Amino acid sequence: MGMPLELNTMIVTKGKEIRLEENWFMLEKEAYRLYPLHIPLEVKKTIEGELIGTASIEKLEWAEGKTKITYQLIALNSTN
């Protein structure tokens, strides 16, 4: 039996990100998702929404049907 997996090339937060410190955030998403690590990715609140900034994912964890990413915001386009 296969494992469902989604490949993502952008971080979509839907406002559920948790600030860990300064420019470091953690985001937990339902299902297993694969993201590229250590390269700049766009950060948006929604898929069709305005670009918030650029981030680099430094850690990705899969457990219990969820994906948890830890990323560093490297450029901010908006303060909202």
Image (spheres, helix red, strand yellow):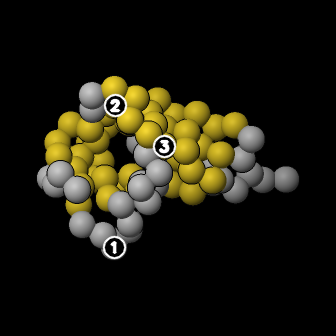
> Which badge, 1 or 3, comes first in the chain's sequence?
3
Circle 2 residue: 24
In the rendered view, does 57 fall on the left or right side of 68? left
Name the kind of residue labelled 1 in the image: Glu
Q: Which amino acid does label 2 sit on?
A: Trp
* Cα–Cα gap, marks 3 and 2: 10 Å
- Residue drawn at x 51%, y 55% is 7
Q: Residue at x 18, y 51 (%)?
A: 79
Disc sitting over residue 27 in the figure:
3
Q: Residues within 10 Å of mark 2 (few under 14, many from 20)?
A: some
Which dot marks residue 48?
1
Q: In the picture, residue 80 is in which quadrant? A: bottom left
**Residue positioned 74% across, 51% down in the render:** 3
- Residue 30 visible in image: yes
Q: Residue furthest front?
A: 80
Q: What residue type is labelled 3?
A: Leu
1 or 2: mark nearer the eye: 2
Query: Which label number is shown at residue 76?
Result: none
The residue located at (44%, 40%) in the rendering is 18
